[in-house]
Amino acid sequence: MLNMMRDYIRQETVEPVKFLFGSIFFLFLGSLFIAAGFVLISIGLVGLIQRFDEMNAWFSWVPYFSGSIALLIMAFFAFKILITKKGQDV
């Protein structure tokens, strides 16, 4: 009886916590990779726009502004996807 009770407690407490930790770890790691990708894309966009000769002293703010706008757009779509996935029935 004690072995059965111990196994039941382990099944209902320890195993779900292990599964939850694994899920949270991979979700956190995935979100870090996505955030790093967004930042790298915006830095690449800034570098691409800075290559144009027209971006002299008067328009030096344009590449940074476009990189910031790109980050905002990517964040908006990421949150939009997150909210629509959360609202759907699984």
Image (cartoon, helix red, strand yellow):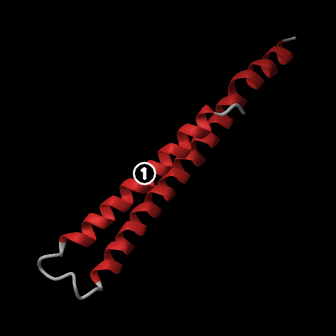
The furthest residue to the top: 1
Q: Vertically, is 67 above or below 90? A: below
Q: Where does residue 4 sit, x and y in percent of width and height?
A: 86, 17
Q: Residue at x 17, y 75 (%)?
A: 59
Q: Vertically, is 26 above or below 61? A: above
Q: Where does residue 16 sit, x and y in percent of width and height?
A: 69, 29
Q: Where does residue 81 sit, x and y in percent of width and height?
A: 55, 45
Does residue 80 appear left or right of residue 2 in this picture? left
Nearer to me, 5 or 66: 66
The furthest residue to the left: 57
Report the residue marked by disc 1: 75
In the image, what residue type sits under mark 1? Ala
Q: Residue at x 72, y 31 (%)?
A: 15
When asked about the image quadrant of residue 71, the answer is: bottom left
Q: Residue at x 66, y 34 (%)?
A: 88
Q: Quadrant of the N terminus?
A: top right
Does residue 60 appear left or right of residue 21 in this picture? left
How many badges with numbers are in the image? 1
Q: Quadrant of the C terminus?
A: top right
Q: Where does residue 45 sit, x and y in percent of width and height?
A: 37, 73
Say what secondary structure mark 1 lies in.
helix
